[in-house]
Image (cartoon, coloured by chain):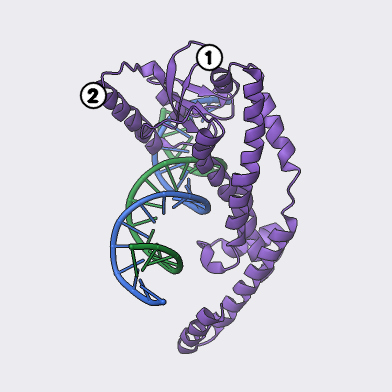
Chain colours: A purple, B green, C blue
DNA sequence: GGGCGCGAATACCCTCGAAT
DNA sequence: ATTCGAGGGTATTCGCGCCC
C-alpha cells in the first residue's frame, strides 16, 4: 500500500515535468505578439507605469506577460491537467462516467466515491455551483437507470489543496448537499495515508527547482515589445498605409 | 481522405467591491 | 468584519470549411 503511494508521488513528479511544464512553456512561447492579448486601453499604460515607472513598449510588454504567465495561464493549465492527472497518476481510479473525474474507494468509510476534482478552495463561482450540481444530478439519474445505488454522500467534490476553512461560500453551498473534501483530508481518503498530502506537495516543490524560465520570459517580452513598437508606429500612419502595412506584416511572419 | 486553421463552446481559475 | 456574487481572464477540445 505504502509503496503504491510512493509510486503515486513519483508519477506526480513525472506528470508535472511531462505535462504541466511543457504546456506552460508553450503557452508562454505564444505570447510574442500583441494579438495574443486582450487589451484594455484604459489600463495598459497605467499598468506598465505602475510596474516599471514608465510606459515604453518593453514595460507594456512586461505588464502583459508577467500576470499572464505567472497567474491565469499556469493556474488554468494546472486545473485543466488535473483531469489527466487523475487518470494517469491516479491510475486505476479513472471514471468512465461523464462529469465525474475519478472514482475511488474511500479509505475512511470504505464506500465507492464518485468525485469531481477542483484545484483549490476558491476556484468556482456562482454559476459553477449549478454546473457541478447538474453533473451530480445526471449521474444519479444514470445510476437509477442502471439500478446502481448511489447516495448523495457518495457524490463528492475533491479539492486538491487548501483547508476546510478556506472553502469559499460557493463550495459551502455544494457541501450542503454533497460532501466537499479538501486538501489533506482528500488525499487521506484517497490513499489511506495521513501524511500523503504533505509528501505530495513536498515532492512537487522539489521538481520546481529544476526549472528556470527567466531566459524564455525575457525573450518573449522582447519580441512582444517589438510588436508593440511596430503597432505604435502603424498607428501613426494613415489608415490606408496602415492597411497596406498590416497586409505586409502577415507575410513577414 | 487527411491535415490545417480558426472560431465557438466548454471547462478552468481567481480577486475584488457591494451587500449584509 | 464577513459573506457573496459579479466580473475578469485562460486553455483545450471540437466541429467546420478549406486546401492538398
Within 10 angstroms of label 1, few (less than 14), some, or many (20 or more) residues? some
Within 10 angstroms of label 2, few (less than 14), some, or many (20 or more) residues? few
**A229 above or below A105?**
below
Q: Is residue A210 left or right of residue A232?
A: right
- In the rendered image, residues at marks 2 and 1 fall on the same chain: yes
Q: As rendered, which of A16 and A229 lies closer to the eye?
A: A16
Q: As rendered, which of A193 and A146 lies closer to the eye?
A: A146
Q: Secondary structure at mark 1?
A: loop
Residue C5 percent location from the top left of the image: 39, 37
Per the image, the residue denoted by label 2 is A145
Q: As rendered, which of C12 and A14 lies closer to the eye?
A: A14
Q: Is residue A209 left or right of residue A175?
A: right
Residue B3, by quadrant, is bottom left
**Disc 2 sits on a residue from what chain?**
A
Residue A180 percent location from the top left of the image: 47, 23
Residue B17 percent location from the top left of the image: 50, 44
The number of callouts visible is 2
Residue A41 in view (yes/no): no
Q: As rendered, which of A193 and A221 lies closer to the eye?
A: A193
Per the image, the residue denoted by label 1 is A107
**A174 above or below A49?**
above
Residue A65 in view (yes/no): yes
For the point 54% across and 36% down, which residue is it?
A88
Structural distance between the alpha carbons of marks 2 and 1: 28 Å
Residue A164 - label: none
Q: Furthest-top residue in view? A: A109
For the point 48% across and 31% down, which residue is it?
A117
For the point 60% across and 60% down, which residue is it?
A64
Image quadrant in which the C terminus of chain A is located = bottom right
For the point 52% across and 12% down, which residue is it?
A108
Residue A220, by quadrant, is bottom right
Residue A94 percent location from the top left of the image: 46, 31
Amino acid at each position: 500500500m505504502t509503496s503504491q503511494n510512493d509510486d503515486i508521488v513519483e508519477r506526480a513528479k513525472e506528470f508535472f515535468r511531462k505535462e504541466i511544464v511543457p504546456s506552460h512553456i508553450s503557452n508562454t512561447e505564444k505570447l510574442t505578439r500583441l494579438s495574443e492579448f486582450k487589451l484594455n486601453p484604459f489600463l495598459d499604460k497605467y499598468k506598465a507605469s505602475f510596474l516599471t515607472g514608465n510606459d515604453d513598449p518593453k514595460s507594456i510588454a512586461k505588464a502583459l506577460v508577467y500576470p499572464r504567465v505567472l497567474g491565469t495561464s499556469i493556474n488554468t493549465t494546472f486545473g485543466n491537467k488535473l483531469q489527466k492527472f487523475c487518470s494517469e497518476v491516479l491510475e486505476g481510479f479513472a471514471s468512465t462516467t461523464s462529469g465525474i473525474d475519478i472514482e475511488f474507494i474511500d479509505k475512511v468509510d470504505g464506500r465507492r466515491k464518485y468525485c469531481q476534482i477542483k484545484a483549490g478552495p476558491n476556484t468556482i463561482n456562482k454559476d459553477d455551483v449549478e454546473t457541478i450540481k447538474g453533473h451530480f444530478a445526471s449521474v444519479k439519474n444514470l445510476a437509477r437507470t442502471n439500478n446502481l445505488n448511489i447516495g448523495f454522500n457518495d457524490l463528492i467534490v475533491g479539492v486538491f489543496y487548501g483547508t476546510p476553512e478556506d472553502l469559499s461560500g460557493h463550495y459551502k453551498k455544494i457541501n450542503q448537499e454533497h460532501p466537499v473534501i479538501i486538501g489533506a483530508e482528500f488525499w487521506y481518503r484517497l490513499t489511506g495515508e495521513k501524511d500523503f498530502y504533505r509528501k505530495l506537495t513536498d515532492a512537487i516543490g522539489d521538481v520546481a527547482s529544476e526549472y528556470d524560465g527567466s531566459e524564455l520570459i525575457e525573450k518573449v517580452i522582447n519580441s512582444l515589445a517589438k510588436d508593440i513598437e511596430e503597432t505604435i508606429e502603424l498607428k501613426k500612419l494613415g489608415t490606408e498605409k496602415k492597411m497596406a502595412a498590416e497586409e505586409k506584416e502577415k507575410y513577414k511572419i
